[in-house]
Amino acid sequence: MTERKDELAGNLARVQERIAAACAAAGRPREEVTLIVVTKTYPAADVRMLADLGVRHVAENRDQDAAPKAAECSDLPLSWHFVGQLQTNKVRSVVGYADVVQSVDRSRLVTALSREAVRAERELGCLIQVALDAGESGRGERGGVAPRGIGELADRIADAEGLRLDGLMTVAPLTGEYAGRQQSAFERLMDLSTHLRRTHPAATMVSAGMSADLEQAVAAGATHVRVGTAVLGVRPRLG
């Protein structure tokens, strides 16, 4: 194994131990929580090493980086998650490789995703990104729809050809009533998930928590955690 692969293996083992400990503390089976490794800014070589180490879910947030990386790793048994704010002019490219788009937050994006999924003859999983810091605009600083907009958007996704409503996603907000209160933010997301599942029972996925707050997300009930830095190290500066 290369020095980099050794480093990744050690980091990955520590993250897995954190998830297992968080599950034990919450009285949850370990298999209830899926690790998604956020590989943005890191090369395809790292993705390949992670796949060798047993990682099966990876995430990206910029299509211009993700598309060539996914193509280079197309032989690997990976599920690709798109987690960034998605512009409609990038939808065709993203639908070409993503298995799940976790950042669906507006009707126009649903329409574009459906059209391209049908064209590509694919079924695309969708998570509604929930903005717990949404103000009067109904959107958050880092994208997402206000909780009051979940129901309408969920119905649109569920009715759209080529799309599958999988659940909800959030990023712990930096402003508003939940700033610095990750546990409360994630518990709020779980409440919203419970409400959503009354009308869409199959939408069971709850994506929350990152390197710094995965324990709080697991305690709240998240089914998926998105971890980058704790596995791959401090990201190199872009530009």
Image (cartoon, rainbow, N blue to C red):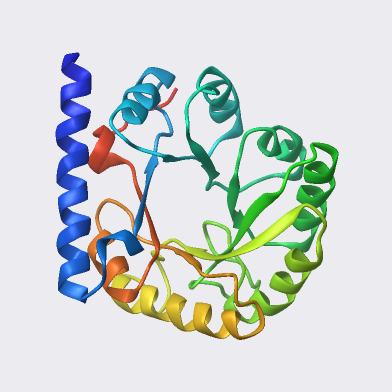
* Residue at the limit of the structure toward the top, as seen here: 2
User: For this view, does 31 lie left or right of residue 207?
Assistant: left
Does any portion of residue 166 appear in the rendered image? yes
Vertical order, 147 against 21 (above or below): below
Q: Residue at x 83, y 45 (%)?
A: 118
- Locate residue 140, reporting x and y percent: 55, 65
- Locate residue 24, reporting x and y percent: 16, 69
User: For this view, does 41 lie left or right of residue 203?
Assistant: left
Quadrant of the rendered structure where residue 134 is?
bottom right
User: For this view, does 13 lie left or right of residue 114?
Assistant: left
Q: Residue at x 31, y 32 (%)?
A: 235
* Count of number-bearing discs: 0
Give the quarter of the figure containing the C terminus: top left
- Locate residue 95, reporting x and y percent: 70, 39
Nearest the viewer among 138 and 64 is: 64
User: For this view, does 230 lie left or right of residue 33?
Assistant: left
Nearest the viewer among 65 and 194 is: 194
Vertical order, 94 against 167 (above or below): above
Q: Residue at x 68, y 59 (%)?
A: 164
- Locate residue 44, reporting x and y percent: 43, 20
Give the quarter of the figure containing the N terminus: top left
Vertical order, 235 against 129 (above or below): above
Quadrant of the rendered structure where residue 49 is?
top left
Does any portion of residue 236 appear in the rendered image? no
Q: Residue at x 31, y 35 (%)?
A: 54
